[in-house]
Image (tube, rainbow, N blue to C red):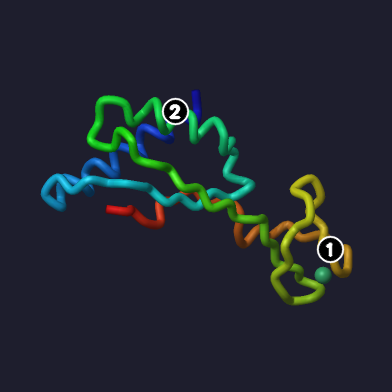
Amino acid sequence: MHELSIAMSIVEMATEESERRGGAQIHAVHLKLGHLSGVVKDALLFSYDVACEGTPLEGSRLVIEEVPVTVYCPACRSQRTLASIQHFYCPVCSAPTPEVTQGKELEVVALEI
Ligand SMILES: [Zn+2]
């Protein structure tokens, strides 16, 4: 399962950070998750709880901030937020927008200790 291996690497990373701080208790992990990351939020939340079992992170929360897909429209010369990830067209002028500038994120942004 894709999400489980991601959850395990998040837990591993946070555990190392906790050890670096002398075994500090981690209450929550904040994650940025883009709509194009290919990760299912609910599956990741579930996997996180599984991955935390028996680790110093047991009982901590995974807080997911979802990042909408943003593209660069060459016609408008500006950033646009896509209404749907099925259609890579500018919502203002309908030009094709192949350049994704945001939405592929899968990164830990903060730890609550
Ligand atoms: Zn446009």
Judged left or right of residue 75, residue 13 is left
Q: Position of residue 7 (x, y in %)?
A: 41, 34
State the count of labels: 2
Q: Position of residue 85 (x, y in %)?
A: 74, 48
Q: How packed is label 2: few (under 14 Cα within 10 Å), some, or many (20 or more)?
A: some
- Residue drawn at (76%, 71%) of the image: 74
- Residue at the far right in the pictured view: 94
Judged left or right of residue 61, residue 94 is right
The secondary element bearing badge 2 is classed as: helix
Q: Give the quadrant of residue 8.
A: top left
Give yes or no for contact between labels 2 and 1 (Cβ–Cβ under 8 Å).
Answer: no
Q: Is mark 2 within 8 Å of ligand 1?
A: no
The secondary element bearing badge 1 is classed as: loop
Q: How packed is label 1: few (under 14 Cα within 10 Å), some, or many (20 or more)?
A: some
Where 29 falls versus 8 (above or below)? below
Q: Give the quadrant of residue 68.
A: bottom right
Judged left or right of residue 92, residue 55 is left
Q: Amino acid at mark 2?
A: Leu
Q: Is mark 1 within 8 Å of ligand 1?
A: yes
- Residue at the far bottom in the pictured view: 77
Q: Which residue is mark 2?
A: 4
Q: Which residue is mark 1?
A: 91
- Residue drawn at (24%, 41%) of the image: 15
Q: Position of residue 27 (x, y in %)?
A: 32, 46
Q: Amino acid at mark 1?
A: Pro
The label shown at residue 107 is none
Q: Which sits earlier in the primary sequence, circle 2 or circle 1?
A: 2
Q: CA distance from mark 2 to mark 1?
A: 35 Å
Q: Position of residue 67 (x, y in %)?
A: 59, 55
- Residue drawn at (42%, 33%) of the image: 48
Quarter holding ligand 1: bottom right
